Image (cartoon, helix red, strand yellow):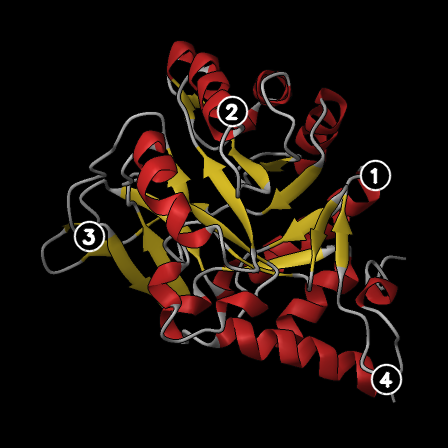
Amino acid sequence: MNKPDLTVDLSGLQLSNPVFTASGTFGFGEEYEEYVDLDRLGGVMVKGTTLEPKQGNPTPRIAETPAGMLNAIGLQNPGVDYFIAEILPKIRDYEFRTIVNMSANTIEEYQKLAEKLSKPEGIAALEVNISCPNVKKGGLAFGTEPEMAAGVVEAVTKNTDLPVITKLSPNVTDITEIAKAVEEAGSDIISLINTLVGMKIDIDKQEPILANTIGGLSGPAIRPVAVRMIYQVAQAVDLPIIGMGGIMNSRDAVEFLLAGASAVAIGTANFSNPRVTMEIIDGIEEYLCEHGYDSVQEIVGRAIK
C-alpha cells in the first residue's frame, strides 16, 4: 500500500505535513535540533515576537497543574529586529515553514511588525496573537471583542503580502463571532485555541504561586474545550483551521482533525516529550493507513454532523 499523502494547503501555505509546533513552546526551533529532525516538521510557530525586546514577567512564572501547566512568561523575547538579524538567518534553511507569532498592544505596533516581518526572506506566514491587551482600550484584550479583533487583522493584512493566521482566544462567550469577524477582515487562516486564564494558590504561604497572580492554562486539561471550539468554528467559517490545545499524542491530533482542523500545533507536550512531534507525524500516517485513507485531507471535519 502506498503511503498516504500528508501534504496540506492552508490558503496557499504549503506544508509537507499537518504538524506545527505552537508558539512559546519550541523556542525558535533550533533549540530542539538535538532531539528532533526539524526538516520533518510541517511548520514552526516561533516564540511570540514584539516590536521592542521584552524581559517578561518576574518569577515564578510557571506552575504545574494536575493535567497541564500555568504560565505567565510575559512574552519574553529579543524583539523583532534581533529576530530578523540574528535568528532568522540560522533557521531559514530548514525545510519547515517558519511562522512568526506577533504580539502588540496597539494597532500601530501590529502594523509596524507586519511591515518589518514582510521584508526578509524565510518567513512563510504571520500568526497574529490577539490575546494581547489593547492599551488604548484600558487593557481589554483585542481578541475578546469582534470589532477590535477585526481591526487588528485589517491593519496587518494591509501591511503584508504573507498569509495571515489569526490566533483566537478561548476566553470569550462565543468564539464563532470572533472567528467570523476576522474572516471578514481578511484573515487567511485561523488558529485556536490560546490558553485559558487560570490561577493557582500555595495554601501554605496563602498566596498565588505565579508572581503575575494569574496565567494561561495549557495542556491536556484544556483539550476538550479546544476540540469543542474547533468543531464550532469549523462550521461557522470557511477558513482552514490550525487546531491546538492539549495535544499529547497522535490520537489527540487525529481528534482535532476530525473536529475540523486542517492542521495541528503541538505545545505543552514538547516540554515532557521533546520528540512528540515526530511521533505524532508517524502516528497520523499510521492511522490513515489503518483506516484506508489516501490523504490526511480525507479526515478533516469527518466527525462534524
Q: CA distance from mark 2 to mark 3?
A: 36 Å
Secondary structure at badge 3 equals loop
The answer for how far apart the CA atoms under marks 1 and 4 are is: 31 Å
Q: CA distance from mark 1 to mark 3?
A: 41 Å
Where residue 103 sits, quadrant-wise, is top left
- Name the amino acid type tagged 1: Asp
Label 3: few (<14), some (14–19) or many (≥20) C-alpha neighbours in 10 Å: many
Residue 224 pos. (x, y %): 61, 60
Seen from the viewer's position, the closer of residues 79 and 260 is 79
Residue 101 x/y as whole percent: 48, 40
User: Left or right: where does residue 113 sit relative to residue 284?
Assistant: left
Percent from the top left, x then y, of residue 94? 51, 59
Q: In the structure shown, which secondary structural element does the residue marked by tag 1 occupy? A: loop
Task: Identify the disc placed on residue 238.
Answer: 1
Q: Who's the residue at 49% across and 55% down the image?
A: 93
Is 68 left, or right, of 94 in this rendering? left
Which disc number belongs to residue 114? 2
* Numbered mark located on residue 38 in the image: none
Classify mark 2: residues with Cα within 10 Å, few (<14), some (14-19) or many (20+): many
Separation of residues labelled 4 and 3 (CA atoms): 52 Å
Which three-letter amino acid code belongs to the residue tagged 2?
Ala
Q: For the residues marked 4 and 2, what is the alpha-carbon distance in whole angstroms?
A: 41 Å
Residue 245 vs residue 102: left or right?
Answer: right
Question: Which is nearer the N-term, disc 4 or disc 3?
Answer: 4
Residue that numbered label 4 is attached to? 2
Q: Quadrant of residue 187?
A: top right
> In terms of secondary structure, where does tag 4 sit?
loop
Dot 2 or dot 1, earlier in sequence: 2
Sequence-first tag of 1 and 4: 4
Q: Which residue is mark 3?
A: 209
Q: Secondary structure at mark 2?
A: helix
